[in-house]
Image (cartoon, rainbow, N blue to C red):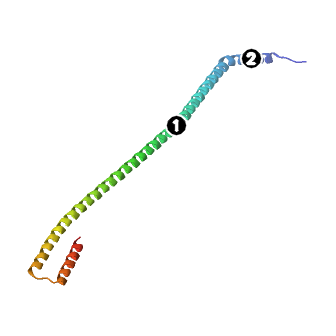
Amino acid sequence: MVNINFTLIIQVISFLILMYGLSKILYKPVTGFLDSRSDQIKKWIGEAEKVREDSVKEREEAKAFLHEARAEAEKIREKVEVQAEAERTKAEERAKEEAKRIVQEAKAEVNRELERAKRELQKEVGTLSILIAEKIIKRELTERDHQRLVEESLKEVRRLS
């Protein structure tokens, strides 16, 4: 049979008391510490997750802002190009109008000079006619001389025209 001695019983009772004391003294504080540490770690993980989500959200917002800024820059560039083209067209129009005005002024000046030259030519023709008349009066002309003087006068008038 089983021989149970007194020492074994005391050892079992001591063991049970030790287990009870350890559970009261160590088990609850250790499990409490481990639970609080677990809660703290969960809290840190939650905060890290929130920070990660916030950073993802901010990155998406930054991408959207950058996209909007690029679109706005493109609109501004297009607007500037349109304005530059309009300015270039206006400058060309002004240059054409200025060239037209200069050409008209030059034509007017040429016409004035032409009229002045015609007036001078008429004076010269009148003077030439007087000289021919003087020559005719001073000497007696033959028919041949008369013909020659008329031809010379016509040539001179043609040359001056």
Q: Secondary structure at mark 2?
A: helix
* Relative side of 8 to 52, left or right: right
Q: Nearer the viewer, residue 153 or 24?
A: 153
Q: Quadrant of the C terminus?
A: bottom left
Q: Position of residue 156 (x, y in %)?
A: 21, 75
**Quick one: which residue is furthest to the front in this view?**
143
Image quadrant where residue 110 sits: bottom left
* Nearer the observer, 124 or 97: 124
Which residue does the numbered mark 1 point to in the structure image? 64
Relative to residue 158, is residue 51 depicted above or below? above
| Amino acid under disc 1 | Ala
Q: Which residue is mark 2?
A: 16
Instruction: Say above or below: 77 vs 54.
Output: below
- Which residue: 13% across, 71% down? 127
Residue 47 pos. (x, y %): 57, 28
Q: Is residue 38 above or below residue 92?
A: above
Q: Which residue appears at 18% of the width and 69% of the height?
A: 121
Point out residue 129 in the picture as x, y percentages from the top left corner: 15, 73
- The residue type indicated by label 2 comes to Leu
